[in-house]
């Protein structure tokens, strides 16, 4: 059991390291692409127009990321509310005079079904 935990921790550390290196390389590439765009735009237009175009591109991409983050946050809240409503509906659908063991079994079955639906 301990070996499984160690393996999972090692896999998580390896994934985090690879993601960090990938992000660093991506940022370096973005810097070079920005420099190339600056050179091209400053030759084609003047420096003010070049900086305006590059700044607007970065601001637009940043706003898109913010919008996606806000929308995904709202959908996770809606999902949590729907999940809570399902659990309450399942709890209220239990027969009132059933033994506690049956209630616990049915509650566990419903939780398992909800967990399976969340993974899909």
Image (cartoon, rainbow, N blue to C red):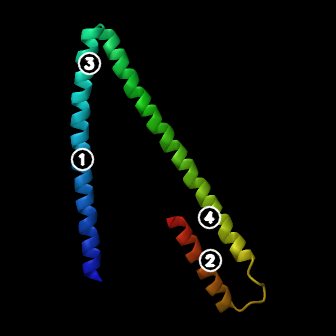
Mark 2 is surrounded, within 10 Å at the Cα level, by few (under 14), some (14 to 19) or many (20 or more) other residues, namely some
Q: Could you give the CA–CA distance between mark 2 and mark 3, rounded to whole angstroms?
A: 58 Å
Label 4: state its secondary structure: helix
Q: Which numbered circle lies on residue 22?
A: 1
Looking at the image, which residue is at 60% across and 81% down? 109
Q: Could you give the CA–CA distance between mark 2 and mark 1, rounded to whole angstroms?
A: 41 Å
Q: Could you give the CA–CA distance between mark 3 and mark 1, rounded to whole angstroms?
A: 24 Å
Q: Is residue 20 above or below residue 34?
A: below
Q: Could you give the CA–CA distance between mark 4 and mark 2, rounded to whole angstroms?
A: 11 Å
Q: Is residue 21 above or below residue 106?
A: above
Looking at the image, which residue is at 25% across and 40% down? 26
Q: Which numbered circle lies on residue 110?
A: 2
Q: Which numbered circle lies on residue 96?
A: none
Left or right: residue 62 compared with residue 84: left
Label 1: state its secondary structure: helix
Q: Which numbered circle lies on residue 38?
A: 3
Res. 113 image quadrant:
bottom right
């Amino acid at each position: 059991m301990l070996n499984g935990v160690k393996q999972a921790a090692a896999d998580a550390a390896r994934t985090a390291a690879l993601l960090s290196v990938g992000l660093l390389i991506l940022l370096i590439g973005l810097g070079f692409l920005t420099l190339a765009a600056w050179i091209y735009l400053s030759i084609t237009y003047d420096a003010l127009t070049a900086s305006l175009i590059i700044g607007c591109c970065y601001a637009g991409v940043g706003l898109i990321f913010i919008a996606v983050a806000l929308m995904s946050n709202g959908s996770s809240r809606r999902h949590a509310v729907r999940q809570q409503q399902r659990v309450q509906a399942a709890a209220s659908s239990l027969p009132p005079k059933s033994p506690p063991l049956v209630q616990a079994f049915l509650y566990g079955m419903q939780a398992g079904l909800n967990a399976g639906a969340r993974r899909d």
